[in-house]
Image (cartoon, grey):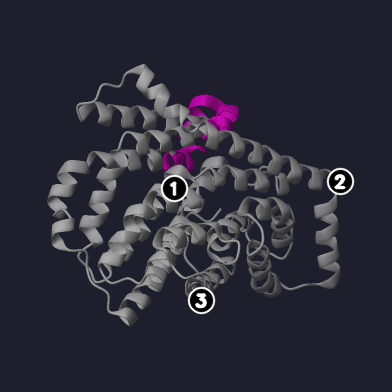
Amino acid sequence: MMAFMVFGTLVEETGIITDLLDIIVALVGKFSGGAGYVALLCGAAVGSFCGSGPGTVAAAGTFTIPAMNKTGFSAETAAMVAAAAGSLGPIIPPSAAIPIMFMMLEAAQPGYCTASQFWLFAWPVSFWLVIQRLITLYIIVRRQHLHPIPQEDRMPLGEALKKGWHTLIILFLMIVPFVLDNMFAATVIKNRIGEYGSARFSEIVLVTVPAVSCLMVLFLWYKKGNKPDITIILHMVSKCIYSIAPIVLMTFSGFAMAALLSDIGMAEEIVSQIETFAIPKWAVVIVAPLIFTLFGMFMESSSVYFLLGPVFIPVAISVGINPAMAAMMVNVLCNGMGQISPRFALCLLISMGIAEADFSKTSYQAIFWCFTQYVVIVFMLFELLPMFGMMI
């Protein structure tokens, strides 16, 4: 987790992320409401690296919100789109929230899957959340008759790819090792390094991937004419220390709380009580997201998933919900939903401050975004959306 946060810091500090953002702008900026699509995709890209929804809004919103305003978005709509984009960050790998959810899954059902399998499963879940936001934005763009990004403000796609195609190598390095581990852990890898080595191989991948990716970032930075002096690199990395420390503490606290509830039998007691009442799966699927959303309106997201996550996961498993899906939904409900559902919606509050948007009008728009996300969450919990072979 710390390695991925160092990687995210290097991507931002070296400016490599701007090459990827230029490609995104070139791809979707020419469409009506293109600035909104750019804001969503850029927010998802930046957020997945930094792992913080509010941090993503603060970083990306400073240039995506003015771009949206310039092409006809109202301050309230621009703020809502930026907040919806930022809230995607903690859901998409390599977000630091993914290991936290895996630890909670391990506490509830030890040995259910490997870290690599859970990592890969996070991708289709993230995909459907991105699709939900793009469709929601499309509806808004159609209703408000919004404009594309002016041609002078975006590169031709060929030029953007020529300038930044190297950044796609980083995405390749971030995904392929986990795919190979998932495909060959029980066969080729096990035959080569034995059963114990195969069982620990996904943990090796989790450390190796960000390390290699960091080296690739520094290499690309060097190719741009910079000198990767050790002092400069240490100065860049030092900037993420204050963000690493609290996340490590929260991760340990969350794992300790989940383990404690398991050790004292509280989770099992709650599950047995639910079984006594014979609560059906559909009731948990429909009501649980509403409970998370209600708590998220008044509490910070990490507090909500440490409070409700260790209880929700075993309860969801007891009624037949896929364990990995239950763990991922804690992340989605706390970060994806909680950070855009007023009143205590940090992503929304930050984006409103940048856009100077009216709180009441922006909160009214948030209802529509939360509703469409709620529908997608229910569909995923019922396993009605394809997971492209990643379902564990």
**Amino acid on which disc 1 is placed:** Ser
Of the numbered discs 1 and 2, the one sitting upstream in the chain is 1
Q: What residue is at 59 percent from the left and 33 percent from the top?
A: 245
Viewer-proximal residue, 314 or 229?
229
Q: What residue is at 57 percent from the left and 31 percent from the top?
A: 200
Q: Residues within 10 Å of mark 3 (few under 14, many from 20)?
A: few
Q: Percent x, y for residue 92?
A: 46, 51
Disc 2 on helix, strand or loop? Answer: loop
Label 3 vs label 2: CA separation?
Answer: 43 Å
Of the numbered discs 3 and 1, the one sitting upstream in the chain is 1
Q: Which residue is mark 3?
A: 364
Which mark, residue 264? 2
**Amino acid on which disc 2 is placed:** Ile
Disc 1 on helix, strand or loop? Answer: helix
Which mark, residue 99? none
Viewer-proximal residue, 91 or 121?
91
Q: Residue furthest top?
A: 230
Q: Which residues are magenta?
A: 178-203
